[in-house]
Amino acid sequence: MITIIAAIANNNALGKDNQLIWHLPADLKRFKKVTLNHHIIMGRKTFESLGKPLPKRTTIIITRDTKLEVDGCIVVHSLKDAINAAKQDENPYILGGAEIYKQAIDIADKLDITLVHHDFDADVFFPEINLNIWEETSREDFKADNKNKYDYSFVSYLRKKEALSN
Protein backbone atom coordinates (compact mmCIF):
# COMPACT_ATOMS: atom_id res chain seq x y z
CA MET A 1 0.00 0.00 0.00
CA ILE A 2 1.39 3.39 -1.01
CA THR A 3 0.18 6.23 1.20
CA ILE A 4 0.36 9.95 0.55
CA ILE A 5 0.59 11.87 3.80
CA ALA A 6 0.03 15.62 3.81
CA ALA A 7 -1.25 18.54 5.83
CA ILE A 8 -3.36 20.80 3.62
CA ALA A 9 -5.51 23.86 4.16
CA ASN A 10 -9.12 24.39 3.05
CA ASN A 11 -7.78 25.97 -0.16
CA ASN A 12 -5.37 23.00 -0.70
CA ALA A 13 -2.42 25.15 0.41
CA LEU A 14 0.68 23.17 1.38
CA GLY A 15 3.30 25.80 2.03
CA LYS A 16 5.04 28.98 1.06
CA ASP A 17 8.72 29.69 0.41
CA ASN A 18 9.52 25.99 1.02
CA GLN A 19 8.09 26.13 4.55
CA LEU A 20 4.92 24.98 6.27
CA ILE A 21 2.57 27.89 6.84
CA TRP A 22 1.14 26.71 10.15
CA HIS A 23 2.36 24.93 13.27
CA LEU A 24 0.13 22.14 14.59
CA PRO A 25 1.94 20.04 17.21
CA ALA A 26 -0.87 17.44 17.12
CA ASP A 27 -0.23 16.91 13.40
CA LEU A 28 3.53 16.58 13.90
CA LYS A 29 2.99 14.04 16.69
CA ARG A 30 0.62 12.00 14.52
CA PHE A 31 2.97 12.24 11.52
CA LYS A 32 5.82 10.82 13.61
CA LYS A 33 3.66 7.98 14.98
CA VAL A 34 2.31 7.01 11.56
CA THR A 35 5.60 7.15 9.60
CA LEU A 36 7.95 5.65 12.21
CA ASN A 37 9.86 2.62 10.92
CA HIS A 38 8.67 3.19 7.34
CA HIS A 39 10.23 4.46 4.14
CA ILE A 40 9.42 8.11 3.50
CA ILE A 41 9.62 9.44 -0.05
CA MET A 42 10.03 13.13 -0.80
CA GLY A 43 11.40 15.59 -3.30
CA ARG A 44 14.70 17.38 -2.72
CA LYS A 45 13.09 20.68 -1.71
CA THR A 46 10.93 18.95 0.87
CA PHE A 47 14.01 17.22 2.24
CA GLU A 48 15.85 20.53 2.39
CA SER A 49 12.95 22.05 4.35
CA LEU A 50 13.36 19.24 6.92
CA GLY A 51 17.12 19.75 7.00
CA LYS A 52 18.09 16.17 7.84
CA PRO A 53 16.90 12.56 7.63
CA LEU A 54 14.14 11.84 10.12
CA PRO A 55 15.07 9.32 12.83
CA LYS A 56 13.88 5.71 12.63
CA ARG A 57 12.72 6.11 9.02
CA THR A 58 14.37 5.33 5.70
CA THR A 59 14.51 8.58 3.74
CA ILE A 60 14.26 8.44 -0.05
CA ILE A 61 14.90 11.70 -1.90
CA ILE A 62 13.78 12.25 -5.50
CA THR A 63 15.90 14.72 -7.44
CA ARG A 64 16.94 15.56 -10.99
CA ASP A 65 20.46 16.27 -9.68
CA THR A 66 22.47 13.20 -10.69
CA LYS A 67 25.37 14.26 -8.44
CA LEU A 68 23.38 14.67 -5.21
CA GLU A 69 24.45 12.42 -2.35
CA VAL A 70 23.03 12.73 1.17
CA ASP A 71 24.43 10.73 4.08
CA GLY A 72 21.84 8.42 5.56
CA CYS A 73 19.45 8.74 2.60
CA ILE A 74 18.66 6.93 -0.62
CA VAL A 75 18.78 9.30 -3.61
CA VAL A 76 16.79 8.44 -6.75
CA HIS A 77 15.71 10.30 -9.88
CA SER A 78 12.03 9.38 -10.33
CA LEU A 79 8.95 8.46 -8.34
CA LYS A 80 9.06 5.00 -9.93
CA ASP A 81 12.64 4.51 -8.68
CA ALA A 82 11.63 5.73 -5.21
CA ILE A 83 8.78 3.24 -4.98
CA ASN A 84 11.09 0.50 -6.20
CA ALA A 85 13.65 1.46 -3.52
CA ALA A 86 10.89 1.15 -0.89
CA LYS A 87 9.47 -2.15 -2.14
CA GLN A 88 10.43 -4.09 1.02
CA ASP A 89 8.19 -1.71 3.06
CA GLU A 90 4.52 -2.79 3.03
CA ASN A 91 3.44 0.84 3.45
CA PRO A 92 5.84 3.55 2.28
CA TYR A 93 4.73 7.16 2.75
CA ILE A 94 4.99 9.93 0.19
CA LEU A 95 5.66 13.29 1.86
CA GLY A 96 5.66 15.65 -1.11
CA GLY A 97 6.26 18.28 -2.25
CA ALA A 98 3.62 19.51 -4.62
CA GLU A 99 5.15 18.07 -7.80
CA ILE A 100 5.69 14.66 -6.18
CA TYR A 101 2.10 14.69 -4.86
CA LYS A 102 0.83 15.51 -8.35
CA GLN A 103 2.62 12.44 -9.75
CA ALA A 104 1.82 10.15 -6.82
CA ILE A 105 -1.90 10.80 -6.55
CA ASP A 106 -2.43 8.67 -9.67
CA ILE A 107 -0.72 5.62 -8.15
CA ALA A 108 -1.33 5.92 -4.40
CA ASP A 109 -3.68 3.55 -2.59
CA LYS A 110 -4.40 5.79 0.39
CA LEU A 111 -4.41 9.47 1.36
CA ASP A 112 -3.64 10.32 4.98
CA ILE A 113 -4.59 14.00 5.22
CA THR A 114 -4.51 16.53 8.01
CA LEU A 115 -7.04 19.12 6.90
CA VAL A 116 -6.35 22.52 8.46
CA HIS A 117 -9.65 24.41 8.56
CA HIS A 118 -8.33 27.75 7.35
CA ASP A 119 -7.34 29.36 4.04
CA PHE A 120 -3.71 30.41 3.68
CA ASP A 121 -1.65 32.44 1.25
CA ALA A 122 0.60 29.83 -0.37
CA ASP A 123 2.78 29.15 -3.38
CA VAL A 124 2.39 25.35 -3.46
CA PHE A 125 -0.85 23.38 -3.40
CA PHE A 126 -2.04 19.80 -3.01
CA PRO A 127 -3.87 18.31 -6.02
CA GLU A 128 -7.66 18.28 -5.86
CA ILE A 129 -9.01 15.16 -4.11
CA ASN A 130 -11.49 13.73 -6.60
CA LEU A 131 -14.28 12.04 -4.63
CA ASN A 132 -15.15 9.96 -7.69
CA ILE A 133 -11.78 8.24 -7.13
CA TRP A 134 -11.27 8.59 -3.38
CA GLU A 135 -13.59 7.42 -0.60
CA GLU A 136 -13.33 8.94 2.86
CA THR A 137 -12.89 6.07 5.32
CA SER A 138 -12.24 7.87 8.59
CA ARG A 139 -12.29 11.36 10.08
CA GLU A 140 -11.38 12.78 13.45
CA ASP A 141 -12.25 16.46 14.03
CA PHE A 142 -10.46 18.69 16.52
CA LYS A 143 -10.97 22.24 17.73
CA ALA A 144 -8.15 24.74 18.07
CA ASP A 145 -6.58 24.81 21.52
CA ASN A 146 -3.70 26.48 23.33
CA LYS A 147 -1.16 24.36 21.37
CA ASN A 148 -2.91 24.11 17.98
CA LYS A 149 -4.00 27.46 16.57
CA TYR A 150 -6.49 26.16 13.98
CA ASP A 151 -9.34 23.66 13.89
CA TYR A 152 -8.18 20.55 12.04
CA SER A 153 -9.22 17.05 11.02
CA PHE A 154 -7.34 13.82 10.40
CA VAL A 155 -8.98 12.34 7.28
CA SER A 156 -8.16 9.07 5.53
CA TYR A 157 -9.20 8.18 1.99
CA LEU A 158 -8.87 4.92 0.11
CA ARG A 159 -8.87 4.63 -3.66
CA LYS A 160 -12.26 3.25 -4.75
CA LYS A 161 -12.03 -0.23 -6.25
CA GLU A 162 -13.83 0.82 -9.44
CA ALA A 163 -11.29 3.65 -9.83
CA LEU A 164 -8.48 1.05 -10.14
CA SER A 165 -9.72 -0.17 -13.51
CA ASN A 166 -10.01 3.32 -15.05
Image (cartoon, rainbow, N blue to C red):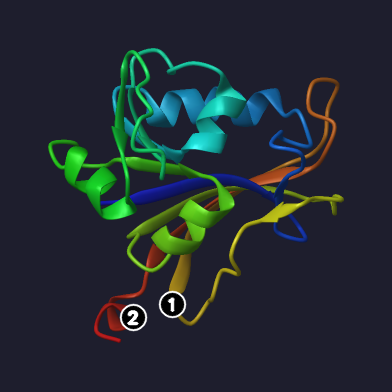
Tell me the distance, in whole angstroms, between the alpha carbons under discs 2 and 1: 5 Å
Name the residue furthest bottom. 166
Query: In the image, what residue occupies the spot 19% across and 36% down?
Result: 89
Q: Are marks 2 and 1 in contact (CB under 8 Å)?
A: yes
Q: Position of residue 63 (x, y in %)?
A: 41, 41
> In this rendering, would 42 be left or right of 19?
left
The residue lying furthest to the front in this view is 67
Residue under the image location 54 percent in, 76 percent down: 130
Task: Please state which of residues 61 and 112 is positioned toward the viewer in this rendering.
Answer: 61
Q: Mark 1 — residue?
A: 133
Q: Where is residue 77? Give x, y as percent.
A: 32, 45
| Type of the residue with mark 2 | Ala
Give the SS element for disc 2: helix
Outermost residue, left side: 88
Quick check: 18 left or right of 103? Answer: right
Q: Quick one: SS at disc 1?
A: loop
Residue type at tag 1: Ile
Q: Position of residue 143 (x, y in %)?
A: 79, 39
Residue visible at 33% across and 21% down in the picture: 57
Q: Position of residue 3 (x, y in %)?
A: 37, 49
